[in-house]
Amino acid sequence: MIGGLFIYNHKGEVLISRVYRDDIGRNAVDAFRVNVIHARQQVRSPVTNIARTSFFHVKRSNIWLAAVTKQNVNAAMVFEFLYKMCDVMTAYFGKISEENIKNNFVLIYELLDEILDFGYPQNSETGALKTFITQTGIKSQSKEEQSQITSQVTGQIGWRREGIKYRRNELFLDVLESVNLLMSPQGQVLSAHVSGRVVMKSYLSGMPECKFGMNDKIVIDKQGKGGASDEAGKSGGGGGKQSIAIDDCTFHQCVRLSKFDAERSISFIPPDGECELMRYRTTKDIILPFRVIPLVREVGRTKLEVKVVIKSNFKPSLLAQKIEVRIPTPLNTSGVQVICMKGKAKYKASENAIVWKIKRMAGMKESQISAEIELLPTNDKKKWARPPISMNFEVPFAPSGLKVRYLKVFEPKLNYSDHDVIKWVRYIGRSGIYETRC
Amino acid sequence: MPYLGGDEVVRELRRALVNPHIQSDHLRYRNIIKRVIRVMSQGVDVSGLFSEMVKACATVDIVQKKLVYVFLCSYACVNPELSLLVINTLTKDCCDSNPMVRSLALRNMCNLRLPGLCEYVEQPLMVGLKDKVACVRRVAVLGWAKIHALRPNTEMDAAVVNELYGLLRDPDPVVMVNCLRALDEILQEEGGVAINKPVAHHLLNRLKECDVWGQSEVLAVLQRYQPRSEDELFNILSLLDPALHSHHAPIMAATLRLFLSLCSTMPAVCLSALERARASLLASTGSSSRELRYAALCHVQLLLRSEPGLMGDHYKRFFCGYAEPPYIKQSKIQVLVELVNDDNVLIILDELKGYCTDVNTETSQAAINALGFIGRSYGDRCLDILTGLLELKQEHITSAVIQTLRDLVWVSPQCGDAVCSALEGWEDQLQDTQGRGALLWLLGIYGDRSECFCLDLLRLRT
């Protein structure tokens, strides 16, 4: 398995080094530095093979994390482990930077000991780790605390401890989606997909059972078939309301998969605090929040006329925010004049693009920008390969169409019921790679 | 970097460590030890402080213990005799009432990596295997693997091996997975841990309780198991089906590998397994992290070699985004080449034409080579595109195009005429040896077809 783990800063100096197996020698540290960090060419791939040793690396801001092994390991697992390592470190001390690593190196050595024993990944749930690796050190504990910690580390419900109490029981649900689009110049969707995560912050007492329902197509079809003879009062079955077909989804460890397989219902005992409940992807029936219509006209060899119209495609009552449209310009641009009614547009020469920012835009509206780009005359007959127009935005609905239908909480032992819990649901749809070719 | 001041720092630290005032103040003592470790991380040789650190080991402060153990594990091989002094403390800690302390002590006893200490370590390890608390058992199991790694030639006690096999039935899933790993290492000469029917069924039943790492490990180990009957085989496949769609890339990859090896004698089942896994594979190729995307693309490339028709309709997923890193673009281009067929050749050629003018020279060269590959079956269209590229008069593109044309002519001489007519007049552009060599070769073959060529040849020599 993983023979060694090294963390370097941007200069190639070793910040943390931990060797687990004897087959990794001291020269592995230098080999990685010379061949990857200080290599003259751009990095070729995240996996490098030097002298029968494989180096897997991940870069976070300007810190390099490298895992070294001489055996034939599951590559995806090593990367997943490196990501988990980054997540755990971020959960403890925030951003991963040289400063933070140097200040917390004791903690990191402790973590490396615990998470990766003999090169094999062990328990890496942040919640469980935080109970017994704290930054201030553990003082001698009472017997009950000890047994609580070990039962959490080793017990049935490893993600939640007993005896949690809150005065106000609250539950926040965030549906965070990222919509990706690639559109052809003719307006045809080349590829589109939405990847989303449901993040839950729960501040509930005791060990509550929760049930989460959404407008999943399969559930609604089942209800529609079963309730065909029922009155229309059964919330319009499959016909009226919109349902989404999820391509694939994965859940947090706490969700009972057997129930999901049987009846497609998501029931779980949530971990305390923040956790990612599920992750999913859809590719069908995506609501594309914006439609970008570009029009480029070359006037002779010294001018380019660009007109871009963006149409917002959602309910008029909703507002999209932080909208930014990037229109790339050729390298030999000498000057740009832009006219736009809404928002502010600026030509940024360093990025070779016109950046048009609109603070807010309601649904079913249109905005337009026209620009005249003056070009320096060149001898190059090379035609400018137009890079696509990209957009960034944030919308308060889920582009996949996912809606939370219900979220119920049952705690039989303590005396609060589902009605006493304060629940908040929030939909945030962000743009991922949202490009329109022109 | 304090390489120069190394000796002084060590002397100062030694003075601080033996100072009784500091020793009585817990916090200051711990801070000094932290400094020792920091200095050690920076590369200074602090092995001279070994005896002082050994004394620091006897403390109730867990954080301080951990720090001292980090130091000892790095330098124990240099000072084997002094390490014996630590063993007493460690053995005492192995019987401590706090399970955290027990597991810490066990783990570090094994991390000391001194063959001479093995006899002292074995007894606490045996006790650890039977401990009530799971985290101690986890450490004990891996401890046996470490001991074996230290003494690869000696036989492992049969009682230990039996005990480890027994622990496969442990209620804690991490202990079970650690046992698999330890047995694999210990029984390496015999081909690893023996998976028979009861063990395999037990592992399959408990697969869902394990976390991501555990599941990948179990799936890898199950490859050795041969089911006895077809019924059993299909039962296993249906049990593992949900894992094929897992969003965790390692689990999906391991399950796919297991399926393919189990069904190697039944191609139809293989094919249906690949089709089911296709969705998750495609999802990983669109994953937000570059490294997983790259790993997934490598998987797809491997699979396409054995099953070319697998990704047929999904070629659009492999179109490159503008800002992707070059290694991903190059992998995607290679995949696109394999997916060409009559229906989609025009669209793919259009896409590749766009990539030929990519900013990164290697990517554009890869795209041009890909065009050459496709040109073997769809000659004329590719030739049109290639000649169009020549008009751009970009040096690296022209050079790559000429080399591609040479390869094309080598494989399919019938497009020789078209190539000739395209070549006239481009020799000024080439500066690099590869391109010029290719042009020379082409001239050599087709020099008789056109008079201008002979003149060109003379010009090239000068």
Image (cartoon, coloured by chain):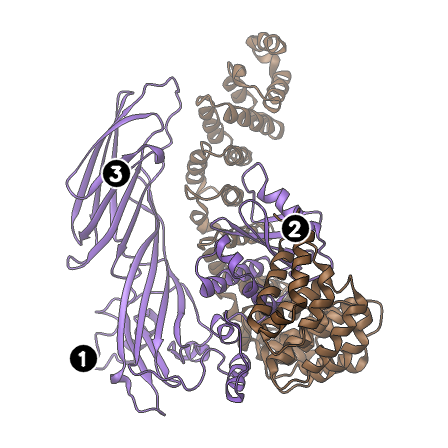
Chain colours: A purple, B brown
Which of the two discs, 1 and 3, labels the residue nearer the N terminus? 1
Residue linked to disc 3? A294
Residue sitting nearer the eye, A330 or B424 = A330
Q: Can residue B374 be seen in this view?
A: yes
SS under mark 1: loop
User: Which residue has dot 1 on it?
Assistant: A233
Q: Nearer the viewer, residue B207 or B161?
A: B161
Q: How crowded is mark 1: few (under 14 residues within 10 Å), some or many (20 or more)?
A: few
What's the residue type where badge 3 is placed? Pro
- Considering only order in the chain, which callout, 3 or 2, is on the residue closer to the N terminus? 2
Query: Pointer 2: what residue?
Result: A29
Dot 3 alpha-carbon crowd within 10 angstroms: few under 14, some 14 to 19, many 20 or more:
many
| Residue A74 visible in the snapshot | no
Q: Position of residue A379 (x, y in %)?
A: 38, 17
Vertical placement of residue A243 versus A340, above or below: below
* Chain ID, mark 2: A
| A88 relative to A13, above or below | below
